[in-house]
Image (tube, grey):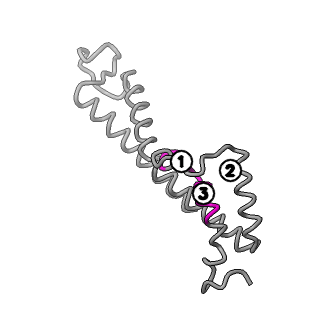
Amino acid sequence: ARGTLLGAAGTVAVVYAVAWLVRRRAGSGRLDGSGRGSGSGRRDQADPRAAAAVMAAVAVLGVAGLPLQQAVSRRAEAAADLAALEITRDPATFVAAKRGLAQANLSDPAPPGWVYVLWSSHPTPAARLEMGERWPHLTAGGRGPP
């Protein structure tokens, strides 16, 4: 639910930002409703050049929002991993499964920071393996699994 709400809020923010950009460009005379250039006297969002401005703005804003989107996704995936450990109480199988997935997918266990921030929707394989290995020490009171 949190991810959906954040996504919806981001979409609304992008729509407002794009509308602001188009209005600003129209007001400055860069857009012309006739499509014949700014000499026609009519400046508005109907100018075909507005489509290029909108697409550029959406692309830039989309990339700018990636770090937040990916951080939310990584947090949800880490919580899912922790829930799996708490339900199964089997860190050895968890670690073996995560190691096997990383090897089968040819994943970089510790990707460069910029790659992780922009493109990684899951914790790194190294972080997931560490969670599995440390899980007995992370449980309530450090008691580990019963």
Amino acid type at image mark 2:
Ala
Horizontal side of 68 relative to 123 (left or right) equals left
Report whether residue 11 is seen.
no
For the point 65% across and 73% down, which residue is it? 135
Report whether residue 25 is seen.
yes
Q: Which residues are magenta?
A: 117-130
Amino acid type at image mark 1:
Pro
Horizontal side of 61 relative to 130 (left or right) equals left
Residue 121 vs residue 146, the one in the foreground: 146
Amino acid type at image mark 3:
Ala
Residue 85 vs residue 33, the one in the foreground: 85
Identify the mark nearer the N-term, 1 or 3: 1
**Badge number at residue 102:** 2
User: Mark 1, residues whose alpha carbon is within 10 Å: few (<14), some, or many (≥20)?
Assistant: some
Alpha carbon separation for disc pair 1 and 3? 10 Å
Contact check, label 1 and label 2, Cβ < 8 Å: no
Position of the N terminus, as image quadrant, is bottom right
Coordinates of residue 75 in the picture (x, y in percent): 55, 61
The residue where tag 3 is placed is: 126
Rendering quarter of residue 64:
top left
User: Dot 2 lies on which element?
Assistant: helix
Coordinates of residue 32 in the picture (x, y in percent): 30, 21
Contact check, label 1 and label 3, Cβ < 8 Å: no
Residue 116 vs residue 8, the one in the foreground: 116
User: Mark 3, residues whose alpha carbon is within 10 Å: few (<14), some, or many (≥20)?
Assistant: some
The residue where tag 1 is placed is: 111
User: Dot 3 lies on which element?
Assistant: helix
